[in-house]
Amino acid sequence: MKLKVNLPDHPYEVLIEKGALDHVNTWVSALWKKQKIVLISDDHVNRLYGKKVTDQLNEAGFEVAVFEFPEGEASKNLATAEKAWNFCAQFGLTRSDGIIALGGGVTGDLAGFVASTYMRGIHFLQIPTSLTAQVDSSIGGKTGINSDFAKNMIGTFTQPDGVLIDSNVLSTLGEREFREGLGEVIKCGLIADAQLWDLLTDLSAEDLLKNFTKIDEIIYRSCEVKRKVVVDDELDNGVRLYLNFGHTIGHAVESTAGYGVVMHGEAVAIGMVQISKVAEAKGLMPQGITEEIRQMVVKYGLPDHYEPWDEEQLYAALTHDKKARGSQIKTVIVPQIGSAKINQVALEEMKDYLKK
């Protein structure tokens, strides 16, 4: 299955295919001329798939070096980016060469940021290996690193030349890591695809979590949601904000809990339930929808709350959110399952949305 991200200045394809990693050399050769490549991957994913990818690329005539960094959100910072820039320079990477991200969302964000800033920008490819990265972060060109104040505060919009998604790699994910990705999948159904929501409703948790039933369809439908909004709003000024449902509060939970304590998809699940609860009470979302969302989140083993819930700390983190504009912040609500709406809120009013 293929999806075409038809951006006017940089169109590219998303390939979704079981076993695609077995012919990554063919995929890369069709997109790039023979050149130097820095493969960026964390120590866990590199141990699993790094040799498989580099061997194929070397055999195809590419010259490949691997930049490996410690696994986890804590590595997505300026210090790691600087090490990667230096590594690229020492390897002799030029503006005619490229970077491949092999890993989850942290790797994709970091590698994309490094590629977009090294020598003012070189091309790159995404090979996402986590469900979260496959259905969300690998598509759309958002890159970024974390600051001491907020997640993804420093970043760029730079589209990849292609995205390769192989659902077979999900078998090496831990169950918690796989469940985490379902936070983004559930969000996609809520904001734009009622049929995806129905599919998640009809499946049992065991079917999906243990047997990966319908996983390629789930990935495809989620990517299609992302593709549509990226094409309509590449730079995140309008409808692309729909993708942030649950994220405003979720990012605040992530940063205050400490990166890695609450995983991204878990934080999104908590954020979706929390903002829906308050929006429903304010009459902005239909009665009963919060409980529907909560039941879906819990069904797939995602958290619907977090303790300790510190409203002051959460509010302080929220004020650094990229969606804040002066004294206002754009949040996302769901008027009905399968649709979304932007709801501009005064920052002061966001304190209401943080009440347990």
Image (tube, rainbow, N blue to C red):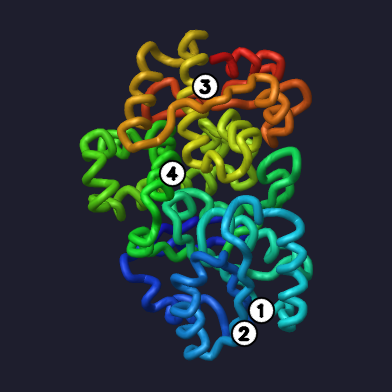
In front of the other: 125 or 151: 151
Residue at horizontal 43%, vertical 20%?
335
Residue 124 in which image quadrant: bottom right
Residue, far top: 282
**Disc 2 + disc 4, Cβ < 8 Å:** no
Q: How many other residues sit within 10 Å of disc 3, few (<14), some (14-19) or many (≥20)?
A: many
Local SS, label 3: helix
Residue 111 in which image quadrant: bottom right
At label 3, the amino acid type is: Ile
Q: Which residue is mark 3?
A: 275
Q: Is residue 217 above or below residue 197?
A: below
Q: Which residue is mark 4?
A: 180
**Which mark is on residue 245?**
none
In front of the other: 107 or 307: 307
| Comparing labels 2 and 4, the label whose residue is closer to the camera | 4
Q: Which residue is mark 2?
A: 35
Local SS, label 1: loop
Q: How many other residues sit within 10 Å of disc 4, few (<14), some (14-19) or many (≥20)?
A: many
